Amino acid sequence: MQKDLEEISDYWEEMYSRQIHEYRPFEISKDFIKFASFFAPGNSYFYIVNLHNFGLEYISDSVEGFVGKAPAKIELKDLLQTVTPAELEIVSLKSKVISDFYTSFLKKEDVLNYKNMFSYRMTDSCGKIRTMLYQAFPLSILESGAPEHVFCIQTDVSHLKVSSTTAVSFLNMNGGKSFYNVDISTGKFDPEGCDDNNDLTK
């Protein structure tokens, strides 16, 4: 399991942090924190990660109920270690598809319009298996268009009877084309996407 975790971390470092040569913090407002907690469909925690060094610039107090550690002592690797061993390879493939979407598929001007989401299973600090919904979107980007700061929210959706899948979805938050259930075994994006407004009358 440790080797799998290291492979994921190494890939993230290669694709993201090596492109960010200067550390710049993200300014977090109280209103941002307040509104972030409104839209989770279950118990959740959220955080902002700086891809320069994968440091957590903010993490909500609710994370302690999942990881069993005080927020101030939690690093990104602690969150990654909660993924069940059976799903580590799947999560690794999902992260590669996500990276490809933001750094190779999208135009720079579109990066901030999209959030990505997928489900996975984790083991919490009490040994309970939970099905989690992971959602993330870039808050800022580099000149190259690569994400720099990313907001992530992870929600326990076990009560919704949602299963973990081998797909990732990319939703346009401004009404543009979305890309649902991208198969991680192929990592192919349909250039046409799916227009969320196709079936709506004026």
Image: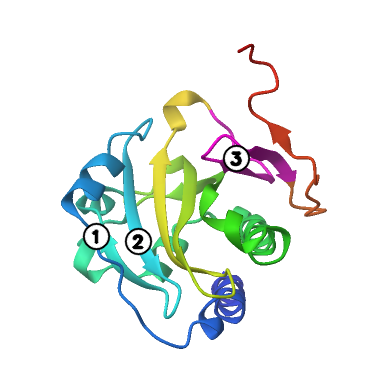
Q: Where are the magenta residues, as a range?
A: 162-182
Q: Which residue is mark 3?
A: 164
Given residues 8 and 170, the one toward you in this image is 170
Query: Is tag 3's residue or tag 1's residue first in the polypeptide sequence?
Result: 1
Q: Which part of the image, by quadrant, shows the C terminus? A: top right
State whether residue 8 is above or below residue 62.
below
Q: For the residues labelled 2 and 1, say whether their Cβ atoms are less than 8 Å apart.
A: yes
Secondary structure at numbered mark 1:
loop
- 3D distance between C-alphas at marks 2 and 1: 9 Å
Badge number at residue 161: none
Q: Which residue is mark 1?
A: 28
- 3D distance between C-alphas at marks 3 and 2: 24 Å
Q: Which part of the image, by quadrant, shows the N terminus? A: bottom right
Residue 129 placement (x, y as % from top left):
45, 43
Residue 176 placement (x, y as % from top left):
62, 38
Crowding near the residue tagged with mark 3, few <14, some 14–19, many ≥20 C-alpha atoms within 10 Å: some
Query: Is tag 3's residue or tag 2's residue first in the polypeptide sequence?
Result: 2
Report if residue 85 is visible in the image.
Answer: no
The residue under the point 49% across, 82% down is: 20
Q: Which residue is mark 2?
A: 48
Given residues 70 and 48, the one toward you in this image is 48
Q: Is residue 121 magenta?
A: no
Q: Identify which amino acid the numbered label 2 is placed on.
A: Ile
Report if residue 83 is visible in the image.
Answer: yes
Q: Identify which amino acid the numbered label 1 is placed on.
A: Ile
Query: How many marks overall?
Result: 3
Quarter holding residue 90: bottom right
